[in-house]
Amino acid sequence: MNRKFLMAVGVFLVFVFLLQWNVPARFVWQPTFAHDDPQPLGCQVFDSLMGRSLKAGYRVTDKTLPRLARERWRRPHAILIQTTCMKTTPTDLKALCRLLEAGHHVLIATGEMSDDTLSSFFGVTIRGATAVIPWQVRQSFQNIELLYDTLRWRRQPPYPERSYRVFSAFVDGGVWLDNHQDCDTLLQAWQATYTDTVSTGYWKAALVAKRWRRGTIYFCSTPLLLTNYGALDPQIHPLLFRILTQTRGLPVVRTEAYTPHTERDSRPSVGPSTCRLRACCSSACSSPAADNGSFRW
C-alpha cells in the first residue's frame, strides 16, 4: 500500500512539473533596452545577435556622450542610443558635435525628443512609439489585419525597396524635419487616414540620415524595434540588419546612458499573446540566421 501511495505521489508530482513547464511564460512590455533584460523590450538577445553578426565589433557601455568623446579611438565608430525620451544637455550636444567632427556615426532611436538643444540644433522633431499597451497587443493578435502598419525601406543601393509588416504599436509617430534640413530618408512608415467612405494615407519618415561635418547622425522613431522582440521577429530582424549596416562596417558601441531607468523587478507582468510570441521566438532562434550568427534579408 505504501509503495503504491509513493508511486501515486511521484506520478502526481511529475504531472504538476510538466504542467508548470508548459505554462506560457509571462512577458513584461515595458521598454528598458537593458543588456541583461530578457523581456521583449530589453536587449539581452539583441546584443547577443549583434555581437555575433557585426564583424567589425560590437559592445555595450554605460558611458555618456561626453565620456565617449574622450575615448582615444584610432578609427571612427558607430554609436547607438535607444531610449523612450531623448533628453540632452548642452554638454551632451557639444560632445555629439565633437564625435561627428571626428567622423563617427551616431544613431539615436527614440520615441520622443524633448524640445531642447538637440532638437533645435539639428532641426529635427521625433514623436514615436514609447510603450506597448498590453490590450493593444492582444487585440493585434485577435484582429491581425487591423493593427498592422507598413514600413518601407526606400531604394538605396545595394538594397532594393522592401516593405515590412509591423504591429502599429511599435511604429507610431515619425520624424519631422524643418523645411531647410538636408536629410536622406531611409525608412518610411505608412500613416493611414480614414473617412466615412474612403481610406487614404501618406508616407512619413521613420529613419533619416544627416551628414554633419565628417560624420553622420541618424534619427529613428522606432526604438521599440531595436530590442529582443525585433531581433527575434523574422519580419523585423532583416530590417535591423539594414539599419545597422548604415554604419559602413564601423565598430558599434551601444550606450545605455540614456535608456529609461526603471526597476524591472517591480514592473507588472502581463501575458498577451504569449503562445504566439513564443512560437515566433522559437522559429527565429532555429532559423539559419540565428544558427550562424548573421542576419538574412
Image (cartoon, helix red, strand yellow):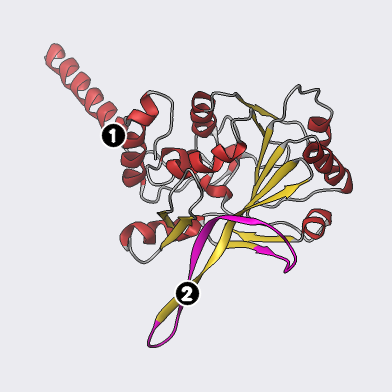
Q: Can residue 290 be seen in this view?
A: yes
- Name which residue lies at 56% across and 65% down: 204
| Left or right of residue 226, residue 9 in this image | left
Q: Do the residues labelled 2 and 1 touch (CB within 8 Å)?
A: no
Residue 190 counted in the magenta span: yes
Q: What residue type is labelled 1?
A: Asn
User: Alpha carbon of mark 2 to alpha carbon of mark 1: how far?
Assistant: 43 Å
Residue 282, image quadrant: top left
- For the N terminus, the quadrant is top left
Residue 94, image quadrant: top right
Q: What stretch is highlighted in magenta?
A: 176-198
The secondary structure type at the circle numbered 2 is: strand
Closer to the camera in the image, 115 or 76: 76
Q: Nearer the viewer, mark 2 or mark 1?
A: 2
- Name which residue lies at 52% across and 41% down: 227
Residue 225 counted in the magenta span: no
Residue 269 percent location from the top left of the image: 49, 45
Is the residue marked by circle 1 packed among few (<14), some (14-19), or many (20+) residues within 10 Å?
Answer: few
- Name which residue lies at 41% across and 55% down: 163
Q: Is residue 275 above or below residue 201?
A: above
Q: What residue type is labelled 2?
A: Gly
Residue 254 percent location from the top left of the image: 65, 33
Question: Could you say which disc has been placed on residue 22 in the image?
Answer: 1
Residue 51 percent location from the top left of the image: 54, 25
Q: In this view, does 205 lie above or below 277?
A: below
Residue 92 percent location from the top left of the image: 83, 43
The residue tagged 2 is 201
The secondary structure type at the circle numbered 1 is: loop
